[in-house]
Image (cartoon, rainbow, N blue to C red):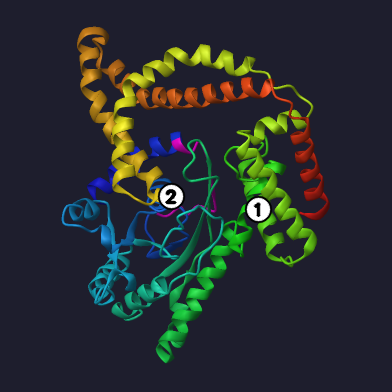
């Protein structure tokens, strides 16, 4: 295990648990090694390898897009056990470079190590609960390794499904579901007779293993409808509008069942199309009016929008939030500006901000804590405890800001007559319950 990989595996645990406080792992593999190719979906760019490399037990080498292997980044990526993979879109001759890469992957598997490959090959710019077609790379890499070993050792393939509430929403949920693995050596006769047929067959098998592990909406145009139903019913994986009294595993199952039901429907059915339009109209109007679904839900239950809870929270947590802001605001702003200027695609932002943010906060606060220890604590253990408490203080500042905006929004809504809008929600919920039979 290389040095930087080990550091990330240890310290990123803290960051991830702050970012995603509710994490469920299903059928998690227990072996560190095992000559296994793990094939995962790829919903959240850099966040996916951080999540799997940190929270799953197996030690893996990551297959990573080649364009990030710049001269400056190569040593860092080597230390984090990353290997480049060249795609057709990387330019002329790029795919030919994979011959050297396949030698490296064969050596990884030969010595009993594991590979992690994101089989879809790319991440959508907008987060959608679906599985894109799986590339043939994982199967090809496995068979090339077996040929290099003259089929004398066994190579396995396993699928991993990553399910986020929303990868870009701080304090969201994550479910990591793992399949059983199968032995690639079982395809030896087929591969030796017809390599392309074997590669295609294995790729289809991987795809069929992955779909049951995630929420897969077949028609991406209907993905917003899936989100809208989850928000109204509050029993799925939506990061804000969900009932946390329902277990995360059950909410994950509910999300899957809704998608499975939707995939089986005639999407040209007039009643279903009308319901989709009704839901789209409701949420567009909600956004235009500056409302939040959880507040409308509260009114729909016949309860009043009290601001007392938010006010008590704002008063009680303010000293900790202020201290957290003093420690984290400057590095947060600097990393935010750097990330959003450097990475044009928003899909990269959350993971880069999380990792660079923790590093920047550590560098920024180390001399501050040293000064506090010299002039105030006079105790090394106490200084270390305080240093590792700073991320919690920073989180309290971020949540305080959220609560402050909720407090302002509630005060504004108290003065509004929302009876008609609440009735729209009730009508939509009734229509969903009558038509969506899952």
The kind of secondary structure element at disc 2 is: loop
**Residue 246 percent across, percent down from the top left:** 67, 39
Q: How many marks?
A: 2
The kind of secondary structure element at disc 1 is: helix
Name which residue lies at 48% across and 60% down: 41
Mark 1 sits on what residue? 226
* Earlier-in-chain disc, 1 versus 2: 2
Name which residue lies at 56% across and 55% down: 129
Q: With respect to residue 57, does 321 lie above or below?
A: above
Q: With respect to residue 369, does 301 lie above or below?
A: below
**Residue 155 percent across, percent down from the top left:** 40, 71
Name the image quarter holding the C terminus. bottom right
Per the rendered image, the range of residues in magenta is 19-31
**Residue 380 percent across, percent down from the top left:** 25, 17
Mark 2 sits on what residue? 56
Q: Quadrant of residue 354?
A: top left
Query: Observer-nearest residue: 215 or 183?
Result: 215
Residue 188 part of the magenta-drawn span: no
Q: Is residue 213 visible?
A: yes
The Cα atoms of the two marked residues, 1 and 2, are separated by 29 Å
Q: Which mark is residue 345?
A: none
Name which residue lies at 78% across and 34% down: 420
Residue 21 part of the magenta-drawn span: yes
Badge 2 density bin: few <14, some 14–19, many ≥20, Cα 10 Å = some
Instruction: Find the residue positioned furthest to the left.
Output: 71
Name which residue lies at 51% across and 27% down: 402
Q: Quadrant of residue 84?
A: bottom left
């Amino acid at each position: 295990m290389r040095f930087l990989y080990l550091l990330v595996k240890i310290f990123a645990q803290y960051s991830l648990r702050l970012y995603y406080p509710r994490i469920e792992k299903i059928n998690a593999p227990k072996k560190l090694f095992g000559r296994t190719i793990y094939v995962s979906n790829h919903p959240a760019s850099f966040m996916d390898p951080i999540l799997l490399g940190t929270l799953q037990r197996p030690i893996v080498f990551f297959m990573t897009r080649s364009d990030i292997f710049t001269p400056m980044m190569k040593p860092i990526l080597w230390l984090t056990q990353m290997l480049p993979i060249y795609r057709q879109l990387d330019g002329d001759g790029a795919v030919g470079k994979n011959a050297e890469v396949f030698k490296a992957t064969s050596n990884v598997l030969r010595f009993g190590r594991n590979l992690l490959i994101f089989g879809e090959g790319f991440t959508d710019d907008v987060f959608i609960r679906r599985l894109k077609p799986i590339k043939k790379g994982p199967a090809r890499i496995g068979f090339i390794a077996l040929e290099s070993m003259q089929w004398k050792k066994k190579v396995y393939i396993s699928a991993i499904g990553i399910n986020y509430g929303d990868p870009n929403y701080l304090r969201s949920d994550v479910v990591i579901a793992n399949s059983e693995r199968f032995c690639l050596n079982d395809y030896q006769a087929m591969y030796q007779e017809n390599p392309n047929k074997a590669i295609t067959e294995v790729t289809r098998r991987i795809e069929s293993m992955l779909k049951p592990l995630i929420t897969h909406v077949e028609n991406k145009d209907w993905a917003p409808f899936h989100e809208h139903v989850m928000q109204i019913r509050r029993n799925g994986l939506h990061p804000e509008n969900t009932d946390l009294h329902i277990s995360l595993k059950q909410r994950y199952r509910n999300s899957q069942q809704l998608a499975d039901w939707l995939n089986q429907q005639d999407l040209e059915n007039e009643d279903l199309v009308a319901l989709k339009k009704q839901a789209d109209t409701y949420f567009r109007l909600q956004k235009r009016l500056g409302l939040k679904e959880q507040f409308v839900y509260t009114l729909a239950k016949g309860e009043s929008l009290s601001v007392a809870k938010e006010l008590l929270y704002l008063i009680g947590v303010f000293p900790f939030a202020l201290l957290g802001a003093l420690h984290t605001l400057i590095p947060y702003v600097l990393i935010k500006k750097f990330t959003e200027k450097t990475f044009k695609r928003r899909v990269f932002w959350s993971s880069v901000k999380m990792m660079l943010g923790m590093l920047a906060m550590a560098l920024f606060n180390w001399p501050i804590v040293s000064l506090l220890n010299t002039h105030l604590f006079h105790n090394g253990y106490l200084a270390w405890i305080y240093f590792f408490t700073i991320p919690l203080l920073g989180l309290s500042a971020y949540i305080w800001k959220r609560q402050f905006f909720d407090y302002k929004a509630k005060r504004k809504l108290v003065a509004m007559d929302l009876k008609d809008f609440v009735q729209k929600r009730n009508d939509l919920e009734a229509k969903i319950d009558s038509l969506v039979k899952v």
